[in-house]
Amino acid sequence: MIDRLHVHLPFRFVDRYLPFILGHRLQPEVAFLADDLDRPIDSSLQQLAHALSGAGLSTIVHAPFMDLNPGALDPLVRDVSLFRYQQTLDVAATLGASLVVFHPGYDRWRYAGQRRLWIEQSLKFWPPLLKRAEQLKIRMALENIFEEEPTSLVDLVSEVDSDWLGHCFDTGHWNLFGKIALTEWLTALGPRLFHLHLHDNFGDRDAHLPIGEGEIDFPLLFDWLSRYPGHPTLTLEAHSPELLLRSLSAAVDLISGGTPKRQP
């Protein structure tokens, strides 16, 4: 499982943290903002791709998400979202990424609980991207954000029914918003669990603590993963090198069957 582990790396901080990434032989999940995609970044992308491939490190990409919604009722919002997501696939191809993570856009409060409205628009949105993703051999994963249970995401992925579209399970978001048990949620995702985001909190805010430093039962999660027949990738979503190294140490302990040591 160690070989499937990645770490969060905002593209805007690549120059600052790439030596740290390479020095520790960490595989990045490179997160892009919309502003990043509007700048002339081809040369920077090629340099990053060369550095990572030369070090034998794989890459995952996280798409922009602010103001975007692939299930929006407004067609202009969907058009902008499609444009940004197409840009992201192009960036991912340049980096040689195997997977792109997207936010799905559903929030029961904004849709007044009418899940089918969002699903129907989403079913129109994803096929063009999936066609391009298949050409590029890049899988796409939808991340739980405000979902209280996985039904909306499971229904969408099942109805799209493509080997190139699956789930990204975010532990921190589940702990904040989820209303069902951890293993019940994971089991509902079935064979389409492509990726996980690993970070901790105490259920009050999206704190992005190192794993094992909040209230999430990570030993239970890793035990479940050890028996899961698929091979999802994982990303540690820490927001500083210090927090990342603590999270990495805990992850290594858990993968080896131990218990992470809590910070004093």
Image (cartoon, rainbow, N blue to C red):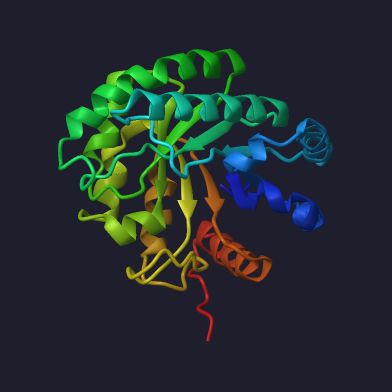
| 3 sits to left or right of 63 | right
The residue lying toward the viewer, choosing from 205 and 20, is 205
Q: Residue furthest left?
A: 113
| 125 sits to left or right of 45 | left
> How far across and how far down the image is residue 40, in percent?
76, 33
The quarter of the displayed image where residue 115 is located: top left
The quarter of the displayed image where residue 248 is located: bottom right
The residue lying toward the viewer, choosing from 166 and 86, is 86
**Residue drawn at the location 29% of the way across and 54% of the way down:** 182
> How far across and how far down the image is residue 252, in percent?
58, 61
Number of dots carrying numbers? 0
The residue lying toward the viewer, choosing from 202 and 11, is 11
**Residue drawn at the location 48% of the way across and 70% of the way down:** 259
> How far across and how far down the image is residue 50, in percent?
83, 34
In the displayed structure, 73 sits above or below 199; it is above
> How far across and how far down the image is residue 262, in percent?
50, 78
Q: Residue furthest bottom?
A: 264
In the displayed structure, 75 sits above or below 172; it is above
**Residue drawn at the location 21% of the way across and 45% of the way down:** 108
